[in-house]
Amino acid sequence: MRREPQQQPIRYVKGVGPHRAELLSQLGIENVEEALYYPPRRYENRSALVSIKDLTPGGLATVRAKVLVRDVRRARKGLSIVEAAFGDASGVVHGLWFHQPYLAQQLTLGDEFILYGRVERHGRSRLQFIHPELERVEGDGETSLHMGRIVPIYPLTSGLSQRWFRQLIATLLERDAADVVDLLPDTLRRRHKWPGVTEALRQLHFPESWEALERATQRLAFEELFLLQLALAQRGARTVSVEKPQRYQLD
């Protein structure tokens, strides 16, 4: 019997394999459909770029800046620290990463990066990020899964990274989302201005706006309730259709 694409075991998706499949199983994800319906825990708004001069200590921020200086140094007990200075037209901010010496090779002087993280003040005037997320700017207008947008944050287990899981979801959306059967009638969706299931899944994971996310989550929540009610109705119908045993009345 032909298996629907979304029922494919997750372990056979390219880039997953037995080890990651076991980790995904701990999250309740055994097949493609369960991955597509796996909801983010929260979202981070990384769509608004901030000039370095406008950074506020203690807040989360996204900046776009060029690498000015980078260095790797060793602290006590062999701890490696990668430090880099990034600049835009308004100022300079520093980034620090611990136990990631390979980053020094990626931070080419003059290249432009997007950084996201919590801003800290060091000393009187120095601003810095500790372990910010980092992505090289590859070209104008290129959309990233991890920066420059509303970014999903998933409840994951140790051994699975947010970046890897986002890429997995993006691959499955592109490959399989169009094959998911829409269970809600068109009239119901139009009445509530809800998207179809394919678009709802896309907006659940990579929303274009907070409004689009709200419509998608409403639609998917109603679908879950709809399926529950349908299952209860079918169970009730089966119970009624069962022939009842003969009853005897005692005088």
Image (tube, grey):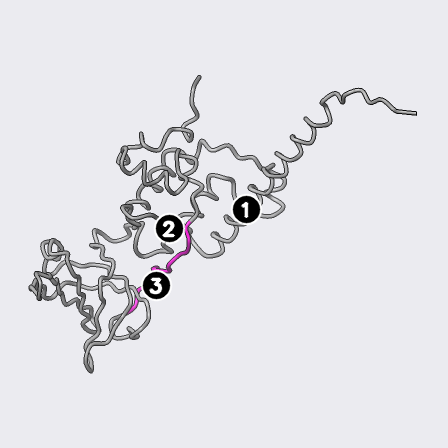
Identify the main secondary structure in magenta: loop
Residue type highlighted by circle 1: Ala
**Circle 2 residues within 10 Å: few <14, some 14–19, many ≥20:** some
Residue bearing mark 1: 221
What residue is drawn where x is 70% and y is 28%?
Answer: 237
Residue bearing mark 3: 48
Question: Which segment did they paint magenta?
Answer: 40-50
Mark drawn on residue 249? none
> Height in image: 75 above or below 248?
below
Residue 43 shown in magenta = yes
Name the foreground residue: 97 vs 174. 97
> What is the distance, in whole Å, between disc 1 and disc 2 at their CAs?
18 Å
Residue type highlighted by circle 3: Ala
Q: Nearer the viewer, mark 3 or mark 1?
A: 1
Marks 3 and 2, the one that precedes in the sequence: 3
What residue is drawn where x is 27% and y is 46%?
Answer: 159
